[in-house]
Amino acid sequence: MNTFYNRYADVILHVALDLHEDDILSINTEEDNVEFARLIAEKAKAITGNGSYLMILENGKEGEMTELYSDFKMTKSPTLFLHLQKYEELPSSFLEKENLSARDIQLYRHLSSPLFLPVPSIPFASVPVPSEYWGNLLDSDDGGERLLAVMISDLLGLNEEDHVRYNKDINDTIQYDEDNLNSHGEIRCRLYDDEGSSDLSFSFAEKSRFASDRMRSQSGRVFFPALCASGYFRATDKRSGEGYVSSSLPFMLFGHIVNNITLFFEKGEIVRFETDEESAKYFEKFLSLDPDNRRIAEIVIAEENNRASGIPLFAYAEWDRMRTTGITLGSPRAESLLYEKEEDIERDKIGESLSNLFIPVGKSTTSIVTDEGEYILEDGIISVR
């Protein structure tokens, strides 16, 4: 496990945050992950010559700020921010609760971000740390921390001879794919697969573009807040969905694993769905939280041969939506919206729910084509113009 954490720290610092000389890192974490925080701070010190700030969180609340590996009292402000996430235990049954708070929704990893976000002042990353609970959630027999180490190693190529270069080489293609996807002028499209499990017409939101988990700070520094990027997302006109989609991979819904679901849309709204009896209870609860949860808020495009596609389920929202092409119900991510004022969003047909749910629908036979006949995605691969 020592090799895993050493290499995981390398990708965090050199790929996700792109650590520069003289950078100052600030780390927020729970007590459980302090040892990993110290390893990261030690590696940062070897490159920057600076210590790091450390804030230990207690039940998600900020504690006292301390310093790691500093030879003197630190006075400069942080230039990078890192959150080491503890995978919190999910609450017990919530179905009997009439309303769910934002905190409840956040614990289940369905909380939407604000639709209008400023450009970040400094690069940041939020990193999940393996735990027995998280691993056992995925596999009660052979799970645990070691299972997570294997999955994360596969995702980030930590077993590659040069694991940092491996990630940077993959990331070099992201801007090309983004530009290619945004070169299509049509906003009305059809998503379908040759096997007939999905056939959905929809429109992208007029003031939107394809974006990815590759971001830029105010100073122009590129960073990856979710450690990697393999999907591209764009907001939709929430009233535009017509047709049906079927899930192609398992996904998490309030801590419950849904293996199969089919949704039917008319005039942009889910009019019925088909799934097993237990999953239906959870999906009905999601639909009851907000009227926009019945509508498609975002389309995610991820190629079938991407770095995350070989993982059936992460139970971690940021990575699960990288596995394949899919739809998001409820609310889109702000990065794909092109608004200068928050009040302008309210006038357009953008989902504004407090919660969201990504449903994977992509296969190697899935295509997305515009009304003009141009393929955006063909047989699971992004089309080149």
Image (tube, helix red, strand yellow):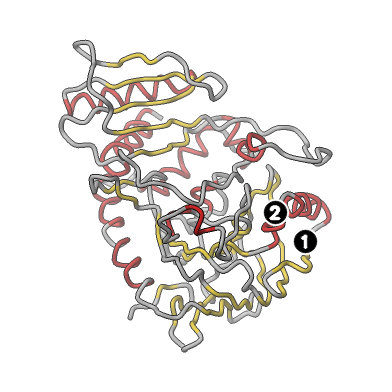
Looking at the image, residue 263 sits to the left or right of residue 6; the answer is right
x%, y% of residue 16?
32, 43
Q: Nearer the viewer, residue 120 or 151?
A: 120
- Displayed quadrant of residue 191: bottom right
Q: Residues within 10 Å of mark 1 (few under 14, many from 20)?
A: some
In the displayed image of the protein, which residue is found farthest to the bottom?
A: 372
Residue 11 seen: no
x%, y% of residue 350?
57, 62
Q: Residue at x 27, y 48 (%)?
A: 222
Q: Residue at x 30, y 62 (%)?
A: 175
Q: Nearer the viewer, residue 114 or 42?
A: 114
Q: Residues within 10 Å of mark 2 (few under 14, many from 20)?
A: many
The quadrant of the rendering that contains the N terminus is: top left
- Displayed quadrant of residue 261: bottom right
**Circle on res. 53:** none
Tell which circle, 2 or 1, labels the residue nearer the N-terminal end: 2
Q: Nearer the viewer, residue 55 or 77?
A: 77
Q: Residue at x 30, y 16 (%)?
A: 68
The quadrant of the rendering that contains the C terminus is: bottom left
Residue 117, relative to residue 298: is it above or below? above
What amino acid does circle 2 point to? Answer: Val
- Displayed quadrant of residue 15: top left
Residue 138 seen: yes
Residue 374, relative to residue 164: is it above or below? below
Proximity of marks 2 and 1: CB atoms separated by less than 8 Å? yes
Looking at the image, residue 173 sits to the left or right of residue 332; the answer is left
Looking at the image, residue 282 sits to the left or right of residue 192; the answer is right
Q: How far, Cα to Cα, is label 2 from label 1?
A: 8 Å
**Circle on res. 275:** 1
Circle 2 residue: 258
